[in-house]
Image: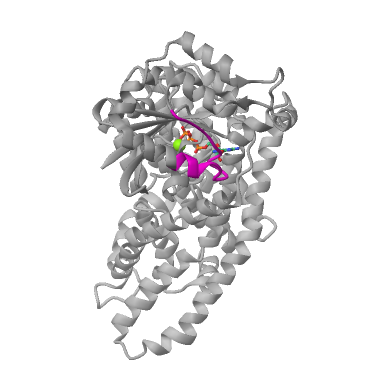
Amino acid sequence: MKRVALVGMPNTGKSTLFNCLTGAHARVGNWPGITVDLLSARILLGDSMVELIDLPGVYDLTGYSDDEAVVTRFLASNAVDLVMVVLNAGQVERQLHLVAELTRRGAPMLLVLNMADEAKALGITIDVDKMARGIGMPVCLLSAKYGQGMERLRGEMTAALRSGAEAASRLTALDEHAVEAVLHEAVSIPAQASHALTEKLDRLLLHHWLGLPVFFGVMFLLFQFVFVVGKPLQDALSWIFNTVRTELLDPLFAFLPAFAGGLLLDGVYNGLTTVASFVPLIILFFICMAIVEDTGYLSRAAFLMDALMSKFGLDGRSFVMVLMGFGCNVPALMGTRVMRSRGLRLLTMLAIPMSLCSARLQVFVFFIAALFSARSGPLVLFSLYLLSMAAVMVTALLFKGRYVNRDSFVLEMPPYRFPTLRQIVLRGWHEVRHFLKRATRFIVAGVVLVWALTHFPASATPGSVDTWAGHIGAWLNPVLSPLGIDPQLTIALIFGFVAKEIVIGSLAVIYAQEGTALVSTIADQITWVQACSFMIFTLLYTPCLSTIATIRQEAKSVSFTVLALVWPLSLAWLASFVFYQLARNL
Ligand SMILES: Nc1nc2c(ncn2[C@@H]2O[C@H](COP(=O)(O)OP(=O)(O)OP(=O)(O)O)[C@@H](O)[C@H]2O)c(=O)[nH]1
Ligand SMILES: [Mg+2]
């Protein structure tokens, strides 16, 4: 099968083009360094199947950060039948030298000038035929985001693959002089090519004094929005699940022996539906994150926070990775590949697991709903986000002497871009799929195990101290009771170690209840101080197994992985202990 690789500078729309050609769902965002690993998919071109590969962005072919190494290693060790170089048409004069560098490798090439829409808005005109003649390869001007110019691209790809070696032999290595000549011949750029809207917006959003308060204000409103809109949706869903159970499933499974009915309904059904009722909240959350990311505001956040972060041994990119960690820690950890300094990378990786991911958000929303009023709820949630940031800072401060940043930070500020509805919907769908995948992997097994632990040995009363779960809870009690965490919550915490999504599911199983009934039981069992202590512990303690596995894989160091396990656990214990002991006497 023929192989086509997408190569280009960061943030030029390679993944957008990849998705457009293949129908895949590669992650896209207005931030240089979204793709950090290679992705491949097959497409039908003409009458043959072709493998298309999306690669991380590179500024040149000599970069040495881990994501750039993915590209150079791929090109060195794989035969590629066609290299499609993707450039931002609006920056063609700055990016064309990458094409020159690639021509020296001798593989057949095709030049894609993406973002034709932006180039046009800037008043830049490009004579595609002249350029093609000048650089000796086919050139396509298109707009991947809006699917414009794709037919012609497919035609050119088919033709280029057909002529193969012949096209390569016609390719001449370009030098800098030739690049200048081509630009002079084929491109006309108005004296003032600037993104007017971006400049206007940045005057406020990057304002010396106002920038940061505006940023935190925006984030606060965003979380408020997710909570205020998402919570009723979640309530509605859990009402539906509950009604299905009492009206339909309970009578339907009445013939089963109590044991099997319990496992199926109290175990699997309660566990899964309690978790599933959070789906609308998670979708909303990710849509908001996608908008912040895709508009380009994330790069502004990096810029605004850079000076402050450097005091903690981190930089603006670390801050953005921590923000991305609010969605899920795993891609954020992988995103650190763009950092060239190993010290900075490790320090950032140590800090990222402190960021309050969407799985932990579920736990908090649940407890907040149980113990706080609708008015104070969002404030408690926002305080947890602040605590999460504080934990990031404390971690960085403590370990910055050990993991030293030796890299200077240069960030290209992309213009503001508005995500299309399609992009937003795709992102939401992508997250639901990811969630369901995890659900089938962890949650079902987790809730069944919790059910078994809370129901065996058979002689014990389910959920009592005589069950296996009761024994485990009692065994850990001396460590966790000073934090106000009771044996039932302890079991939930143990399972939360595998994935935080299981925490609420296991509580549903432990108390054999779901929805509003579960919420009111919890409200009766524990005080708000205990709930907060539990939430603080959940926020900070050892992240889920996937996070640990990712840290191991990215850091390639066992001792670092051990540190990434032990440090959060110690911090969580300490923070909950201090909070509980101070607050219980209030
Ligand atoms: N206006 C406009 N924006 C585009 C176009 N193609 C992509 N974008 C936007 O450009 C940004 C970057 O797109 P990606 O596909 O993530 O870029 P990439 O080259 O894969 O980036 P890295 O993986 O970070 O190297 C996103 O905000 C896209 O929505 C286009 O044709 N026009
Ligand atoms: Mg990409």
* Magenta-highlighted residues: 138-154
Residue in view at x 38 percent, y 77 percent: 265
Q: Is residue 481 above or below residue 85?
A: below
Q: Position of residue 424 (x, y in %)?
A: 57, 51
**Side of 431 relative to 198 (left or right):** left
Indicate whether residue 149 is drawn in magenta.
yes
- Image quadrant where residue 413 sits: top right
385, 120: nearer the viewer: 120
Q: Is residue 180 above or below residue 570?
A: above
Residue 321 appears in the picture as rendered: yes
Q: Is residue 113 above or below residue 287?
A: above
Q: Residue furthest top?
A: 177
Residue in view at x 41 percent, y 68 percent: 271
309, 475: nearer the viewer: 309
Residue 54 appears in the picture as rendered: no
245, 418: nearer the viewer: 418
Q: Position of residue 360 (x, y in %)?
A: 48, 51
**Side of 216 relative to 240 (left or right):** right
Residue in view at x 58 percent, y 55 percent: 284
- Image quadrant where residue 263 sits: bottom left
Quarter of the picture holding the N terminus: top left
Q: Is residue 312 above or below residue 391?
A: above
Q: Position of residue 388 (x, y in %)?
A: 53, 40
330, 11: nearer the viewer: 11
Q: Position of residue 245 (x, y in %)?
A: 46, 81
